Every structure is written in structure tokens, then in C-alpha cells.
Amino acid sequence: MPTDSNLHVFIYIVVSTMPSKSEKTAHLGQGDAAENETRKISTTKLGIIIFMSLFIDLLGFTVILPIMPKLLEFYGDQGSDSLYLAMKSSVESFRVLVGAPDTAKWNSVLFGGFIGSLFSLLQFIASPFIGAASDVYGRRPLILLTMIGVAASYVIWIFAGNFTLFVISRVIGGLAKGNVSLSVAIVADAYKLSERGRGMALIGIAFSVGFLIGPLIGAGFAAGAVPAVGVGEFFVAPALFALSMAILDILYMYCAFEETLIESKRAKSLFSTENNVFDLINPVSLFLFKAVPGVAPEEKRTMKRIGFIYFLYIFLYSGVEFTLTFLTYLKFNYNSMQQGKMFFFIGLVMILILGGYTRRRPTGTEKSTALSGIVLLMPGVLCIGFAQSATLLYTGLLMFAYASSTVVPSMTTLISVYGTESQKGSVMGVFRALGALARGLGPLSISAVYWSVDSETCYIISACAMLIPLALLATTKVKASPKQD
């Protein structure tokens, strides 16, 4: 197919210019000798590298969160950007449709939700391509290439004096943001099955720590506590900070990270006679895992089931998470600082559970661990929805944090068992894409329910809907993970 061939050649030209630190390993020999060389990679060292890279990346990625309302206000005051006016009209139509209050606060939250959904949908498009390309060219060239893309998006943000340029920077960042799915594939490459759960939990810890510290730095920029650069608009300083983190991450990974997918284990091409480019962008094909050919029918059925369960769970979870801002403001009159403390509490609990519990769970307990998270999430959501006191609210948030710390790492470990060594990037890329699609659709969908009924009814519906992924996962026969490799 000509178009597939052209895409293959383009990616090859780009990544072939990036030297791989595993080239000397690949030339030592094929088969067992090369595999033994790969297995000598210290998972402790690799875990530190992955953790630090994700942490550095998330510091830059999350710094924008506290200043987003001020950014939207800045672009709104200009009043002449056609893209801003078009998106504002869409937000207004959505607000009227669901009956949300017409206030500056809610309009800002919904506007931010639209931008967040756009970013997630871009991830949905990009993740399968990035994962599949890393199966062919290796993890190292692709992770460096995606980091360069993210850095480029921050450069554009520095000069984003209008809303259109700001959206362009977000689009480039969304398409390039592939380090998470690649990190998961790296864990699947290098960690034995008996250790893989700990590797996935480490990724979760990096996320939690990054989302704790990054927004605090962003809040410092917003409040003027962090010194600005003295020139340009207020967003230049945080944009420069994000760019510096991206450059630091590129240099760190270039120097520290060694290839984990040796050449003898890589896929021969992006596409085969059994799949094509449309299998990486067609939502139906992604749910069917068509981008991962040659898998036994029974295993393919399990992969599709796990992917669908993951999508449903993230759809509901992200929707509840998004509406927490509405609920705590209306019921408890929480201001931005109090809501920040609430999310800080969730993040801190997640770090403790991920580090002290999830990553210590024995191999083979991933399914039961994920089930326990979903089971606890249901009463947690009800506690939050019906809370009339801070005590009941934080009781629900505690259960919410437990689910946040167990379900996704466990399900990621479950799906990582499937596919050959040359397909792990594709498997994780498709899996992450399904999660991104859910995060793109869930927040706005659940918030529509929230404003159409009331908070209690919305949270009852969300908690009851959790019974679907719970029942599906409970009746799914997953591939057994051996205790020893």
C-alpha cells in the first residue's frame, strides 16, 4: 500500500538520525546472546530513569493548570480571535444545553474542560502510531522524538499572544505526548512478569508526585511568588519553565536511557498484510486491537475485553473527577485554594498506596487488586455525592484515591502480558489510546448528567454504572502470570 510505505519511510528517516545506545549490543549476536545482553539491564536503575524522566516531564506539563483560568481570561479580553469566539460559542451552547450556571467560574471550568478533552483526543490519535513505531525503530529514538515535539509545543506557547497560537501549541503537545505509553512499553520490555506490577506502580508514583509539585509551581507563577522574566506577558515565565524541563528531560534521557528493545526482537514494519494505517486511527479497530495481528483468538478476545473494561472505567472515573470542582464549590463553598488542598490530599494518598501497597502486591493478583479498587470506588463516589460534611467528603476521597492507585496500574500490567515482544509498543499504544478517548469523552458527558439532574443523582448513576466494568472484569479469564520467569 503506497501510503503505508511512504509513512514507513518518513518515520525511518526521522528516527534513523538518532543514535541508539544499544547498537553495540545488537551487533554482538542474534537470538539468545542478544536477549541475555538485554536482560542484564538493571531494573532498579531503569526504574529510577523512568521515574525521573516522567517526573521532570510532569513538572513542565502540569505548571499550566493553575494559570489556565487566567490564560483564558487573557485571551477572552482580546475579543478578536476567531477560534476563541467559536469555542466560546460551543461552550455557551453546551452550558445552555445542560443547564449549568452562567458564571465566569463555570464558564472557565467548562472552557478548560473542552481544551482538556481536545488534548486527550489528540492522544487517542497519536498513541497507537507512537507505540507501533517504537516496535519497529526501538523505544529510545521514539521517546526522544516525542520529547522534542513536546519541547517545540512549549516554544510556541512562549510566543502565544493569541488564542489560536496557544491552541496550536496544545495540538502539537497532544500529538507528541507519547512518553507515558512508551514508558509502559519499556517496563514490559525489561521487567520480568514477576516484577512488572512494581514497574507499572512506579509510573503511577511519578504521576502522583508530578501532579503534586507541578501545580504548586504553577500556583506560584499565578500568584507572583515565583519571579517572572520581566518581559512579555505573564505566561512567558511558566512557559519558559516548561521548556526548560522539556530540554532537561531530553538531555537526561539521551545520556541515561539505553534501548530496551533489541533489533532482533523488533517488528519488521509498521504495517503487515493483516493490518494497515486505518487500524491505528479507526476507533472500532482500536477496540478490536486490529493493530496487533497474529494473536491467538482466545487471547485477542481477552485483550478486547480488557480494553473495553478500561475504557468504561476511565470514562466514569474521569467524569466524576472533573465534577469534583463543581460539587465542592456548590456544597462546601470551596475556593481554589481549598480545592487545591483536596487534590493534594488525593495525590498524597495515592503516593502512599502506590508505594506501600500496589507495587508490593504479589504477581498474579492484578485482577483482584483492580477489582478491589472498583469495589471501593462505588461507595466512595456515593460518599462524595451525598456528603454534607468534610468528614464524609474526605472519607469518599480516600476511597477514590485507593481506586486511583490500584485499578489502572493493575489493568496495565494485565494487558502487558499479551502480544509478542515486538508488539508491546502497539499493545500499550492502543490501550493508552482507549484511555485517552475515555478521558476526552467522560468529563463532558458526566458533567452533562451532573447539570441535567443533581449531584446526588449523578453520583448514584456513576456508582451504579461502575457495576458494568466490575462485572465484566470479574468474569474475564486473564492469562496467568507466572510467579517466576
Image (tube, rainbow, N blue to C red):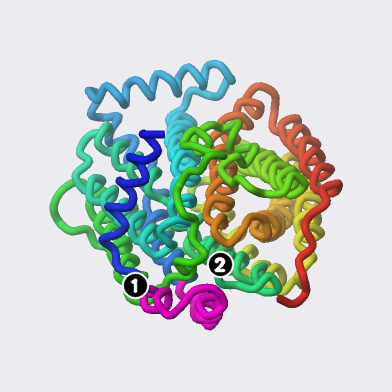
Instruction: Residue under label 2, please give it.
Output: 189
Q: How many other residues sit within 10 Å of disc 2, few (<14), some (14-19) or many (≥20)?
A: many
Q: CA distance from mark 1 to mark 2?
A: 20 Å
Query: Where does label 1 land, which residue?
Result: 252
SS at badge 1: helix
Q: Reply yes or no: does residue 25 show up in magenta.
A: yes
Q: Residue at x 63, y 48 (%)?
A: 294
Q: How many marks?
A: 2
Query: In which quadrant is the C terminus drawn?
Result: bottom right
Is residue 23 among what the camera can see? yes
Quarter of the view holding residue 25:
bottom left
Residue type of the residue flagged with mark 1: Tyr
Residue closest to the eye, 428 or 102: 428
Eye-nearest disc, 1 or 2: 2
- Residue 26 inside the magenta-drawn segment: yes
- Which numbered circle lies on residue 103? none
Look at the numbered disc 2 and give the secondary structure of its residue: helix
Per the rendered image, the range of residues in magenta is 21-49
The picture places residue 327, in percent across and down from the top left corner, at 63, 38
Kindly check if marks 1 and 2 are in contact, taking CB atoms under 8 A apart as contact.
no
Which residue does the image show at 55% across and 64% down from the upper left?
203
Residue 387 visible to an observer of this rendering: no
Above-or-below relation of 292 to 208: above
Residue at 29 percent across and 37 percent down: it is 168
Residue that protrudes farthest toward the left in the picture: 231
For the residue marked with disc 2, what is the amino acid? Asp
**Image point 81% across, 59% down: which residue?**
368
Position of residue 67 in the picture relative to residue 82 (left or right): right
Height in image: 3 above or below 136? above
Which quarter of the rendering shows the N terminus? top left
